[in-house]
């Protein structure tokens, strides 16, 4: 068992447990050579392998190596044994910013300093093509000097969770911080989505409570979509004007990071040193990522066959995962589960297996199949009441062995489509379905 003075690689002495989740434990540790305090995240290889997250986690480590910024928690090195992976990270002893908010609201001047540091970090990460997608006060840590540090960039898949499929319920973040375009299930700009979340964080800091809050999830989502919120009396007119530009429900007209950094409210009292990115050349730690995640041959997952798609299945991110949880499925609040024109299911099969199964099913049902841009189009040649029925099946990749498949009608009579879905398509796909969205039954 880790902790209680156990040595790691004859370099780090592991101390008390700081936190624990479904896939990882985090310990306080000290480098015995330098005396530096660090946080060590310990991951069980077996657990990560079982949910198909080895490749995903490798990519995340590679991304983290690109991010060297004073306002981002640093990943120092990755170590590994036969059964465990160790992330050695910066230790910020000031705790979560959330705890400060929990004690009451923060004065506008102090909130501005935190916000300046947050935006500096986000701007730098965006410049490296990295989007957080789960920004909230709980993911903002303070060091001993009160300097803000963004945590869980690219490592959100390892966040804590309480469900047996904790991954799907932990990385979606808090719904209250999700922008309208995600709720409406539109394609979205990662940068603009992060900006919205930053705006919610700024509101929370100064107000001491969320701008969008309701015990009823549907009511809260309606407020977010309409940007229906009210400023408390102590908000200055300047910060009100500023926040209205950030909490703009239309991502196209929402203020950009560049515009935020040029705005008078943001620049007030700006300490250029505190928000300056680490631009000097730094040596990135060299690790053999594949070696760190290597498992015994008998435990290794088989190689996936090459995909036949013209483009790879889309990678899922934190916001996509919201729709995997029944609790966050908005459509069920408008129509019954068996009346939806859009249905989703998760699968533990590879993308190529899913495609083959859908193609076999389509042929059996006399449907014409065409592939276009990573999607499958299924058409029923016979004319229905409103013309030929056609639907799209789109596959999103969360890991090589975990996918979300979305089936959506694009033409034809809805009742005929629903009947075909219920009577023919769903039963035919049962071998590859882990769970249909909104249904409790899971395939064994």
Image (cartoon, rainbow, N blue to C red):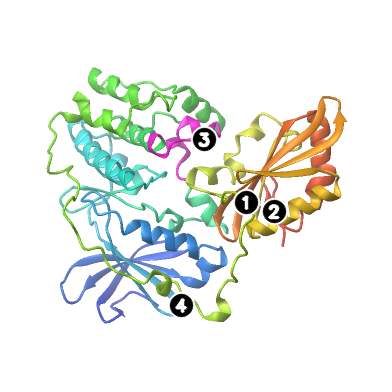
Quadrant placement of the C terminus:
bottom right
Residue behind mark 2: 355
The CA span between labels 4 and 3 is 39 Å
Q: Position of residue 376 (x, y in %)?
A: 69, 44
Ranked by sequence position, the earlier of labels 1 and 4 is 4
Check disc 1 and report the residue beneath it. 309
Q: Please report whichever mark, 1 or 3, sits nearer to the chain's N-terminal start.
A: 3
Residue 92 at x, y percent in the picture: 24, 56
Q: Which circle, 1 or 4, is nearer the viewer?
A: 1
Q: Nearer the viewer, mark 2 or mark 1?
A: 1
Q: Are marks 3 and 2 in contact (CB under 8 Å)?
A: no
Numbered range of the magenta stretch: 173-192
Quadrant location of the N terminus?
bottom left
The answer to whether 104 appears left or right of 181 in the picture is left
Q: Residues within 10 Å of mark 4 (few under 14, many from 20)?
A: some
Please give the name of the residue rendered at 79% of the width and 36% of the height, measured from the top-left corner: 418
Picture disc at residue 83: 4
Question: Viewer-nearest of labels 3 and 2?
Answer: 2
Verify whether residue 305 appears in magenta: no
Per the image, label 1 sits on a secondary structure element best described as: loop
CB contact under 8 Å: marks 2 and 1? yes
Q: Is disc 2 surrounded by few (<14), some (14 to 19) or many (20+) residues within 10 Å?
A: many
Q: Quadrant of residue 411?
A: top right
The tag on residue 187 is 3
């Amino acid at each position: 068992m880790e902790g209680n003075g156990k040595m790691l690689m004859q370099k780090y002495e592991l101390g008390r447990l700081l936190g624990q989740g479904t896939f990882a434990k985090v310990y306080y540790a000290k480098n015995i050579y330098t005396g530096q305090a660090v946080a060590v995240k310990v991951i069980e290889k077996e657990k990560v392998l079982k949910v198909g997250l080895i490749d995903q986690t490798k990519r995340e480590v590679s991304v983290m190596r690109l991010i060297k910024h004073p306002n981002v928690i640093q990943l120092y090195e990755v170590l590994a044994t036969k059964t465990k992976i160790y992330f050695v990270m910066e230790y910020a002893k000031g705790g979560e910013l959330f705890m400060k908010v929990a004690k009451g609201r923060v004065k506008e001047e102090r909130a501005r300093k935190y916000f300046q540091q947050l935006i500096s970090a986000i701007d730098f990460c965006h410049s490296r093509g990295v989007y957080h997608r789960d920004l909230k006060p709980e993911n903002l840590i303070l060091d001993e000097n009160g300097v803000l540090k963004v945590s869980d960039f690219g490592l959100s898949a390892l966040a804590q969770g309480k469900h047996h499929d904790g991954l799907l319920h932990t990385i979606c973040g808090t719904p209250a911080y999700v922008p309208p375009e995600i709720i409406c299930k539109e394609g979205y700009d990662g940068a603009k989505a992060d900006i919205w979340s930053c705006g919610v964080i700024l509101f929370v800091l100064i107000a001491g409570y969320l701008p969008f809050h309701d015990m009823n999830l549907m009511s809260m989502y309606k407020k977010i979509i309409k940007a229906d919120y009210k400023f408390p009396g102590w908000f200055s007119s300047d910060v009100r004007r500023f926040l209205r530009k950030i909490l703009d429900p239309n991502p196209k007209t929402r203020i950009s990071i560049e515009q935020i950094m040029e705005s008078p409210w943001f620049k007030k009292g700006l300490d250029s040193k505190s928000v300056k990115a680490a631009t000097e050349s730094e040596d990135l730690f060299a690790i053999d990522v594949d070696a760190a995640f290597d498992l015994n041959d008998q435990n290794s997952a088989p190689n996936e066959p090459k995909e036949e798609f013209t483009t790879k299945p889309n990678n899922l991110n934190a916001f996509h995962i919201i729709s995997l949880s029944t609790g966050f499925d908005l459509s069920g609040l408008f129509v019954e589960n068996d009346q939806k024109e859009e249905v989703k299911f998760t699968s533990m099969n590879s993308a190529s297996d899913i495609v083959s199964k859908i193609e076999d099913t389509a042929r059996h049902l006399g449907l014409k199949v065409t592939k276009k841009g990573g999607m499958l189009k299924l058409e029923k040649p016979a004319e229905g009441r409103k013309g030929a029925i056609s639907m799209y099946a789109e596959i999103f990749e969360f890991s090589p062995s975990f996918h979300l498949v979305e089936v959506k009608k694009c033409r034809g009579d809805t009742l005929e489509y629903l009947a075909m879905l219920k009577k023919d398509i769903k039963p035919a796909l049962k071998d590859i379905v882990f769970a249909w969205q909104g249904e409790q039954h899971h395939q064994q």
